[in-house]
Amino acid sequence: MRKYKNIVFCTADPTKNAGNIKKYFIENASNLVAFHFFPNFTTENTYYEKFQNGKKTDRKEFKFYKGRNRYLKIIFDYIYFAFVLFFVAENKSYILLNAPIFCIFNEFFSIIKLHRYVLWIGDYYPSHKFPMGLYHAMVNYFNKNLDYVLYLSPPIERIYSRKRAGGKYKDLVWLGIMKEYSRSKRLVKDKITKVGFIGMIRNQQGLDLFFKYLTSADNCHLDVVGDGYLLEHYKKLSKKLGVQNKVTFLGRQDDISQIFSKWDIGIALYENKKDNLSKYCEPTKIKDYLSFSLPVITTKTTYFSKEISASCAGIVIEEDITSLSNAINEIMEHYNQYLEGVNKLITKYDYNKLYDIKFSFMSI
C-alpha cells in the first residue's frame, strides 16, 4: 500500500536526486509530480514529470523563455509552476519545495485546489544585500506563516526555528543515504588514485586547493562532475597551473553511477568562511559520495564533518596541501578501515527509515 496520496516535489534539477527524496516518493506516493528548474547559468528547459503508482506517465518541458536573465527566468518558472499546480497536480496535494519564490500566492492555491504547502528551508546566504535580502525576507515570512516548515540541516534549524511562532508542524529533516554501489579495496597498489568532485562549480568549494595539490602529485587524477558559474574559470586555471592532464571536466551528468564507481575518494573541501553558504547547508555531495561507498576528504566547515570523523568514513583536514596529501595517502593505505566507516554511516542514515518517520505527517 502506498504511504502517500498526492505529492508535488519541486526543486532545482541539479539537486533533484539529492538524498533519494524523489526516488522515495516515486516508490511511496500514489500520485507524484516532480517539477524541476535550472539555475540561470544554463538555458535548459524547466520541466515536470508525473508518476502514478511508481510509473512515469507524463513529461513536459516548458520552452517559452530560453534566456539567462535571472529575473525573467524566475518569473517564467513561477508561471510554469502555477500551471502545474492548476492543471497537472491532483487536488489536495502536499507541495514540498525548497524555493520560497514558489510559495507566493499559496493562500490562493490552498483555497482553489486545497493544496498544502511544505517549505523545506535548505539555504542560508550570509549576505543580506539585494537580491539576497529579498530572499531572506521571503524565507522569514513563509517560515512564520506556513503551516508546515522543515529544516534541512542543524545550522539552518538554529537560524530559522526560533523565528517561527505558529503553524501546525516543523521539524529537522536532513538527507538520507541509499547504498548505490558496493566497493572493495583496490588490488593494484600502484594504480593512479582517482578522486572525484561533484556539485555546482562556484567559489569556496575547495577546487583551488586541490588544483594546487595536483601540481606536485604524479599519481592522482581528479574528475569534476557538474556545471556552474565558474566552470570556464577552473578550466583556465587547470591550464595555468599545468594540471590540465590531471583534471577531467565531465559537465552535468544524469547518470553518475558509472563515473562514481571508478573513483577511490570523494572530496568536499568547503572553505571555512562565514560568507560561505556551505557552512550552513546540508553537504549534499558528501552523502552522494557515501552512497557510492566512497571515503570522503572534507574540511571542518559543515556540521557533518563530525560524523565523518566519528565514523572513520573519511578524514577531516586543515585547508592546506600537506593535510590534503597526508589524507589521500592515509585513506589509500588503510582503505578497508575507511570502507567500514562509510558503511556505518550509510546504515545510520538509511533514507527509507529516515523518511518514513520524518514525512509521516503527509501520509494517508
Image (tube, rainbow, N blue to C red):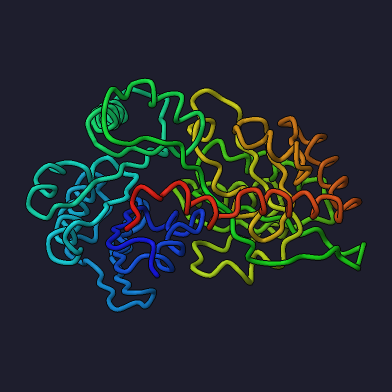
Residue at the (40%, 62%) spot, across then down: 25
Looking at the picture, how far across and down is residue 82, in whole percent?
15, 55
* Left or right relative to 283: residue 358: left
Q: Quadrant of the N terminus?
A: bottom left
Nearest the eye: 286 or 192: 286
Q: Quadrant of the C terminus?
A: bottom left
- Where residue 327 sits, quadrant-wise, is top right
* Left or right relative to 23: residue 142: left
Residue at the (25%, 69%) spot, across then down: 61
Question: Vertically, is 177 above or below 309?
Answer: below
Residue at the (62%, 47%) spot, across then down: 286
- Where residue 126 sits, quadrant-wise, is top left
Nearest the eye: 7 or 289: 7
Count numbered badges in the picture. 0
Looking at the picture, how far across and down is residue 293, in whole percent?
71, 59
Looking at the picture, how far across and down is residue 354, in whole percent?
53, 50
Looking at the picture, how far across and down is residue 266, in whole percent?
69, 52
Residue at the (35%, 51%) spot, across then down: 39
* Left or right relative to 29: residue 324: right
